[in-house]
Amino acid sequence: MRTVTAYAAPSATEPLVETTIERRDVGPKDVMIDIAYAGICHSDIHTVRGEWGEIQYPQVVGHEIVGTVTEVGSEVTKHQVGDLVGVGCMVNSCRECEYCLRGEEQYCAEGNIGTYTGVDPADGTITQGGYSQAIVVTEDFVLRVPENLDVAKVAPLLCAGITLYSPLHHWKAGPGMRVAIVGLGGLGHMGVKIAAALGAEVTVLSQTTSKKDDSIRFGAKAHYATSDPETFTELANSFDLIINTVSAKVDMGAYLGLLAVDGTLVNVGAPSEPLEVPAFALIPARRSWAGSAIGGIRETQEMLDFCAEHGILPETELIPAEQINEAYERVLRSDVRYRFVIDAATFSEPTPA
């Protein structure tokens, strides 16, 4: 086993603290990764604060991980020492259900094993995430990072990138499709960039127009303020696909009214409280309301390659580990444009036993 430094939540109400954790020995099909960068996702905050259900503490979160392979098991064939790789929101699944067999491990019938708060089938321990110096993952859930992507910026693609790529890909966003992205945050700004690269006509729906210049720079054709009631009148029946990235309760009837006939609104933001949908916001125009998780391993690799081909990277702010708690507070204030990335080189070295 290897002792590494990490930042962990001691409870739902306390700040994260520097600590040490044990990483398991590398098994025959495992890969040891020295982490270089880890993104901060709003999901991390929801999780450690108990907003999505009870978890065991202490807990290390982080599911946007980029680093270098430093050791491989005797049966590993997909990766070798020195490779630049990534790990996203999953580190295993049942591998046997219909969803896993078709490459959609995110919908595993048995429940995929999360990068944190899951139960590791290798040793029965609770999985600990990327706010740490190293991680051991089975090779099938390790992704190849294209060399032309900036390693200091690429980590958020492993959650924010794939969370938006997957529904845009599934609902066939492309030329001739009118796409709206609700919310221009860590998820939303990736949705704008990816949808524009796919050839769709993109509109951003944000609370205000303060980020309009960013929207246009990322590839949107228009930006509207949802705080203005006239927006919902002017844009009624306008969109074929709406991706809602907001993790808060919104007026779903109003947003569904922006869809054209046969349009679909997809929720990727996950508020902790239920959303209400009026039936007559759906029925008269044969509209659909859907949800989407991340992507499977195959689709995530496809997303990374697509971003490399089109030069797509998240907008990031690099921080030292000691600023993680401050970054959490700034995320909650929407005071980041648009994703924090932790420089893992700033973790203290573990004290020898």
Image (cartoon, rainbow, N blue to C red):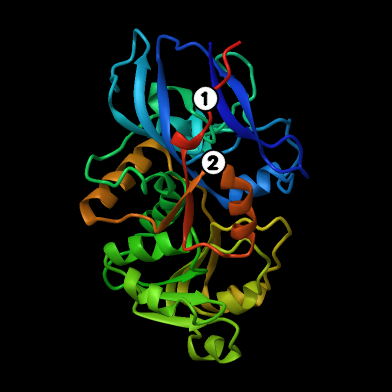
Image quadrant of residue 191? bottom left
Q: Position of residue 212 (x, y in %)?
A: 43, 79
Q: Which of 154 and 132 is in front in this view?
A: 132
In the picture, measured across the screen, residue 69 lies left or right of residue 42, that is: left
Q: Is residue 289 visible in the rendered structure shown here?
A: yes
Mark number displayed over residue 321? 2
Q: Nearer the viewer, residue 47 or 140?
A: 47
Q: Is disc 1 placed on a helix, strand or loop? A: loop
- The three-letter amino acid code for the residue at tag 1 is Glu
Q: Is residue 2 above or below residue 204?
A: above
Residue nearest the viewer, comparing 116 with 302: 116
Q: Would you say residue 103 is visible in this rendering? A: no
Residue 23: quadrant of the picture = top right
Q: What element carries label 2?
A: helix
Q: Where's residue 40, x and y in %?
A: 53, 47
Q: Residues within 10 Å of mark 2 (few under 14, many from 20)?
A: many
The residue type indicated by label 2 comes to Ala
Would you name the residue on which mark 1 appears? 349
User: Which residue appears at 47% of the width and 26% of the height?
Assistant: 134
Residue at image coords 56%, 64%:
335
Classify mark 1: residues with Cα within 10 Å, few (<14), some (14-19) or many (20+): few
